[in-house]
Amino acid sequence: MDTKVSRTLRINLNAVKRLIREHSSYESELSEAQAQISQSTFEPGTSEYKRLLDIRGEAEQMVQDCSRRLEEFMGKLRASLNEAAAFPEDPLVVEARAIIQ
């Protein structure tokens, strides 16, 4: 495989794997923040309650941002995979196909 194609495929593959991990992390952070709010004994309007709401809001924004970036890099990975279609047995190609599916 051409080194340029291989390099592009590796970069996009690693970016997608990283973004999948980040997305999972932010989703768990969001669920923890929602659980903290539902179990909270703070009165609505207090600074502690507002802090919990801010944490949840930030986690929601990060999940949305991470989803957007993941979709962007999935498109780049598909394009890189199309360029490397002549090498179906290459380990990078096999791994990329597994992640896309």
Image (spheres, rainbow, N blue to C red):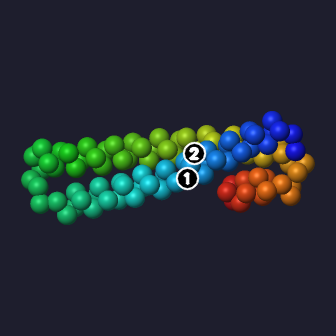
Snapshot quadrant of residue 88: bottom right
Residue occupying the point 49% across, 44% down: 66
Q: Which residue is mark 2?
A: 70
Mark 2 is surrounded, within 10 Å at the Cα level, by few (under 14), some (14 to 19) or many (20 or more) other residues, namely many
Residue occupying the point 69% across, 55% down: 100
Residue occupying the point 67% across, 57% down: 99
Left or right, 97 with reference to 57:
right
The amino acid pointed to by label 1 is Ile
Mark 1 is surrounded, within 10 Å at the Cα level, by few (under 14), some (14 to 19) or many (20 or more) other residues, namely some
Considering the image in quadrants, where does the C terminus appear?
bottom right
Q: Residue furthest right?
A: 86
Left or right, 93 with reference to 16:
right
Query: What is the number of callouts on the image?
Result: 2
Q: Which mark is residue 52?
A: none
Asked if residue 27 shows in the view, the reply is yes
Left or right, 8 with reference to 1:
left
The amino acid pointed to by label 2 is Leu
Left or right, 60 with reference to 10:
left
Asked if residue 80 shows in the view, the reply is no
Marked residue nearer the N-terminal end (1 or 2): 1
Dot 2: element: helix
Residue 50 image position (x, y, % from top left): 18, 45
Asked if the residue at tag 2 contacts the one at tag 1, i.e. Cβ–Cβ closer than 8 Å, the answer is yes
Residue occupying the point 86% across, 58% down: 89
**Closer to the camera in the image, 90 or 36:** 90
Residue 67 image position (x, y, % from top left): 52, 46
Residue 70 image position (x, y, % from top left): 57, 45
Q: Which mark is residue 20?
A: 1
Give the mark toward the camera: 1 or 2. Answer: 1
Using the image, determine if residue 42 lies above or below residue 70: below
Dot 1: element: helix
